[in-house]
């Protein structure tokens, strides 16, 4: 019998992205036989929303782009939206903040739950069966008045799925743990570090301290070695498997850091108190303790449950002063740790780690939450010192619980922090971008070698295009995620890496603590549990992305709000992006990015040269390129859309 080829299907599944114009594009994944991301016009969305997993039917192929229509919603990404209640005749509806939400939501009067028109609210869609009609919703929470700081920040958090309030039963369970406190029985089987010099280094406005360092010199013949302990709050000792605290933390996945507030993963009586490594109090910890020689080589390692008593709480600024000033507290100890950290950093880069540092800003807010100043965050030796020892603990814990040791190659179940190699397509695009800026770049097997990226980034220090290039390099990289499948961490050049050092604010770290304790207790993890751990890793990765989006949205909102009070003022900017419709310019001091539209560049007719990534005036031949410094004036802002319009001066 002659073999029959499989029938070609005109259906496919994928995740739909909706543009601000209401057009959909579906990513089909690995299916290379179809034109990438078929387009779906608004009348064929059939109630599909941004991020939904959908089934589509392809339309017959014409000359242009492949089109399709949504035939089925497989799973919803989001059904709740923040926005302002408006009224037209007798109808009340929500006008969503989300620019990717292309329809208003009707709110029957019985579903207002006390909300009034003009207020900012959070609404859940409860019914949407007919794509020709608007969905019906119900007010879940009244946020406040539009433009009010609290309402806007709550709106940003809830849009990404993070309620600012924890359920009452979660708070109640945390209170019981806090009231119990630390008993004598809790010290049993813990290594005691209470008489060893221990301290924390954190931002000045930090409320929770989940990591501390201990330091002790050890004589080894003529040589001196150092016992350095990385002590992490033993959150898993309090947050038990199956508890309501554990369930809530697993669903949240992470704390969220907005401009003016933290939305914690755990109740504050744990995160800011019992689990926080505050000075002058006993605290229960999980620790990675290393004997390190003067060349920063790890001679031995120990892991386990401990008890500490921090003697000093440093801010980054205070620790920086102690490193520089011989008369400042713990100068000698911090200087030695700083020297060791620099050697660890050098070794990392030698192994192929990528040195990416983007400038960040922080806001000075008045009592109403309005930004009155924006200042750049300084990263000094004290920041890098802490970072380097946390990296050391994370990679050593990852290797230990993987089971890959000198005595055992039996791979254990774990949750890793993995970072895949960049795709050849993205590396080719990056090389093209860098060559157009005038940099000599080579590709080896389709990838720019990490040492070449580092050399380039180092040469850009202090240059106006440095941030744009940093951004382009980051954009070319894969995203780091959590997974039970270890593929290593490309950016850090570690074959094994996990997140162990922040269990107060990251749920995967709590899981890693449990896995480490099981490993140390010789408790075998059942193979069937791997699916549960993989699900946890996937949810944590998704929640981390949402939290990052919320943080960026809050920063963008405050930058736009800051510039809204400065219409007509002139600033210096750097061109951070170029498109056919204009120049994206970043104000030098505040990092406030806005758009200079081509139609507002009246001195010439400008055309976008895609190959050279520049705008060129047709008469005078003036060129605008990435990294160019320009003078700008604030033309106006749109707080709803979080956009700033500049004009050149």
Image (cartoon, rainbow, N blue to C red):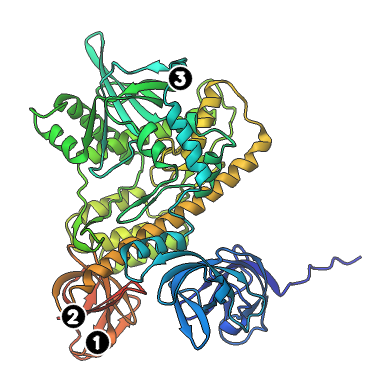
Identity of the residue drawn at 30% across and 31% down:
278
Residue 352: horizontal and vertical position, in percent? 36, 43
Residue 383: horizontal and vertical position, in percent? 25, 41
Is residue 463 left or right of 541 when viewed as pictured? left
Is residue 198 left or right of 402 when viewed as pictured? left
Between circles 1 and 3, the one closer to the viewer is 3
Spatial CA span between label 3 and label 2: 65 Å
In which quadrant will I find the C terminus?
Answer: bottom left
Spatial CA span between label 1 and label 3: 68 Å
Residue of label 3 = 186
Residue of label 1 = 600
In which quadrant will I find the N terminus?
Answer: bottom right
- The answer to whether residue 508 shows anywhere in this view is no
Residue most toward the right? Answer: 1
Identity of the residue drawn at 54% across and 33% down:
240
Residue 566: horizontal and vertical position, in percent? 17, 74
Looking at marks 1 and 2 on the same chain, the residue that comes earlier in the sequence is marked by 1
At mark 3, the secondary structure is helix
Identity of the residue drawn at 24% across and 67% down:
592
Is residue 267 left or right of 433 when viewed as pictured? right
At mark 2, the secondary structure is strand
Residue 539: horizontal and vertical position, in percent? 54, 50
At mark 1, the secondary structure is helix
Residue of label 2 = 648
From the viewer's side, name the closer residue of 479 and 203: 203
Looking at marks 1 and 3 on the same chain, the residue that comes earlier in the sequence is marked by 3
């Amino acid at each position: 019998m002659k073999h029959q080829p499989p029938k070609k299907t005109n259906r496919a599944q994928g995740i739909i992205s909706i543009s601000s114009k209401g057009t959909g594009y579906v990513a089909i994944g690995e299916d290379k036989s179809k034109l990438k991301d078929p387009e779906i016009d608004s009348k064929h969305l059939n109630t599909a929303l941004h991020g939904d997993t959908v089934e589509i039917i392809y339309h017959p192929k014409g000359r242009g782009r492949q089109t399709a229509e949504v035939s089925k919603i497989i799973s919803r990404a989001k059904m709740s939206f923040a926005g302002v209640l408006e009224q037209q005749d007798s109808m009340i509806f929500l006008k969503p903040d989300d620019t990717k939400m292309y329809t208003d939501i009707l709110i029957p009067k019985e579903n207002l739950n006390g909300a009034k028109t003009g207020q900012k609210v959070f609404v859940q869609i409860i019914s949407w069966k007919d794509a020709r009609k608007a969905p019906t919703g119900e007010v879940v929470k009244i946020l406040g008045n539009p433009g009010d700081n609290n309402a806007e920040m709550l709106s940003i958090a809830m849009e990404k799925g993070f309620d600012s309030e924890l359920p009452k039963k979660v708070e109640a369970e945390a209170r019981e743990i806090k009231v119990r406190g630390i008993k004598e029985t809790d010290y049993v089987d813990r290594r005691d570090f209470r008489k060893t010099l221990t301290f924390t280094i954190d931002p000045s406005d930090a409320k929770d301290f989940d990591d501390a360092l201990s330091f002790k010199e050890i004589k080894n013949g003529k040589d001196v070695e150092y016992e350095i302990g990385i002590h992490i709050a033993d959150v898993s000792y309090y947050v038990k498997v199956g508890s309501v605290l554990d369930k809530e933390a697993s669903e949240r996945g992470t704390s969220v850091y907005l401009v003016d507030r933290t939305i914690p993963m755990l109740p504050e009586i744990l995160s800011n108190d019992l689990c926080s490594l505050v000075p002058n109090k006993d605290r229960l910890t999980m620790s990675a303790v290393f004997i390190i020689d003067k060349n920063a080589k790890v001679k031995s390692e120990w892991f386990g449950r401990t008890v500490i008593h921090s003697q000093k709480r440093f801010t980054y600024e205070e620790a920086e002063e102690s490193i520089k000033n011989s008369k400042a507290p713990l100068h000698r100890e911090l200087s030695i740790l700083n020297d060791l950290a620099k050697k660890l950093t050098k070794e990392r880069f030698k192994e192929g780690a990528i040195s990416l540092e983007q400038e960040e800003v922080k806001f000075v807010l008045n009592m109403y939450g309005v930004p009155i100043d924006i200042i750049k965050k300084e990263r000094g030796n004290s920041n890098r010192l802490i970072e380097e020892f946390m990296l050391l603990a994370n990679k050593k814990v990852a290797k230990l619980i993987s089971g890959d040791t000198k005595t055992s190659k039996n791979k254990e179940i774990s949750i890793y922090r993995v970072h895949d190699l960049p795709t050849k397509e993205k590396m080719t695009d990056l090389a093209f971008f860098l060559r157009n800026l005038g940099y000599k770049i080579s590709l080896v097997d389709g990838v720019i070698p990490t040492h070449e990226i580092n050399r380039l980034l180092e040469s850009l220090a202090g240059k106006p295009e440095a941030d744009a290039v940093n951004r382009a390099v980051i954009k070319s990289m894969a995203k780091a995620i959590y997974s039970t499948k270890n593929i290593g961490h490309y950016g850090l050049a570690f074959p094994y890496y996990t997140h162990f050092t922040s269990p107060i604010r990251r749920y995967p770290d709590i899981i890693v603590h449990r896995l480490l304790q099981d490993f140390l207790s010789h408790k075998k993890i059942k193979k069937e549990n791997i699916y549960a751990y993989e699900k946890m890793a996937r949810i944590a990765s998704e929640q981390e992305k949402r939290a990052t989006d919320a943080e960026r949205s809050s920063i963008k909102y405050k930058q736009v709000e800051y510039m809204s009070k400065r219409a007509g003022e002139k600033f210096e900017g750097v061109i951070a992006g170029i498109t056919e419709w204009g120049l994206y310019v970043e104000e030098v001091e505040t990092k406030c990015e806005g758009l200079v539209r081509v139609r507002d560049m009246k001195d010439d007719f400008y055309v976008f040269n895609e190959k050279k990534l520049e705008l060129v005036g047709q008469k005078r031949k003036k060129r605008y390129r990435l990294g160019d410094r320009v003078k700008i004036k604030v033309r106006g802002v749109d707080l709803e859309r979080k956009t700033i319009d500049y004009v050149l001066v």
